[in-house]
């Protein structure tokens, strides 16, 4: 049965919440926060934090946040390289603002370390991550 007093529901506008956050000084040996940042710079910080947080280690974070790298310590390089790529992609794609992660490049010339370069495609544009160091 159709109700007699049917009321038109107005169009619903979906509002995107801004990504404004505190600006972290990401330079080496700096642990300062100064001012605010938004959009692409905020995404760079989000990526930085995700790939530096070991998943399941800190109870403050949801189990979908972070990356699993600790079990790669001591493993052969030829095993670690594809695993690092898979794990970075898996960790970053948990953030709904990131649509794709690719263009991986690896440098294994330094013993015990893999340098990783990749591109993250976000709703704020592409972000190139250069020389992310993963200890193995």
Image (cartoon, helix red, strand yellow):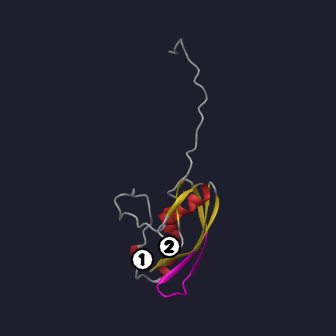
Name the residue at 39% across, 74% down.
Answer: 71
Magenta stretch containing residue 14, yes or no? no
Name the residue at 62% across, 54% down.
Answer: 123
Task: Give how far across and how far down residue 2 sits, in percent.
Answer: 53, 15
Q: Main secondary structure of the magenta part?
A: strand
Q: Quadrant of residue 60?
A: bottom left
Image disc number at residue 100: none
Name the residue at 44% across, 63% down.
Answer: 66
Image disc number at residue 84: 2
Judged from the image, the secondary structure of the residue bearing numbered disc 2 is helix
Magenta stretch containing residue 106, yes or no? yes
Height in image: 21 above or below 74?
A: above
Tally of numbered discs: 2
Q: Residue furthest top?
A: 4
Q: Badge 2 local density, few (<14 within 10 Å), some, or many (20+)?
A: many
Label whose residue precedes the other's in the sequence (1 or 2): 1
23 to the left or right of 123: left
| Residue on which disc 1 sits | 72
Task: Give how far across and how far down residue 5 sits, in percent.
Answer: 54, 12
Task: Give how far across and how far down residue 105 sits, in percent.
Answer: 60, 76
From which residue to which does the magenta span run? Answer: 103-116
Height in image: 127 above or below 12?
A: below
Alpha carbon distance from label 1 to label 2: 9 Å
Quadrant location, the C terminus: bottom left
Judged from the image, the secondary structure of the residue bearing numbered disc 1 is helix
Task: Give how far across and how far down residue 37 sits, in percent.
Answer: 57, 57
CB under 8 Å between discs 1 and 2:
yes
């Amino acid at each position: 049965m159709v109700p007699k007093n049917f009321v038109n529901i107005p169009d619903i506008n979906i509002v995107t919440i801004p990504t404004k956050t505190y600006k972290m000084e990401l330079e080496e040996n700096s642990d300062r926060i100064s001012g605010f940042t938004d959009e692409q710079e905020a995404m760079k910080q989000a990526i930085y934090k995700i790939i530096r947080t070991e998943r399941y280690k800190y109870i403050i974070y949801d189990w979908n946040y972070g990356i699993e790298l600790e079990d790669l310590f001591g493993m052969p390089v030829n095993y670690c390289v594809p695993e690092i790529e898979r794990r970075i992609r898996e960790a970053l794609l948990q953030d709904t603002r990131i649509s794709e992660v690719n263009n991986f490049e690896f440098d294994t010339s330094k013993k015990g370390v893999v340098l990783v370069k990749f591109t993250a495609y976000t709703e704020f544009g592409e972000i190139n991550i250069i020389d992310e160091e993963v200890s193995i």
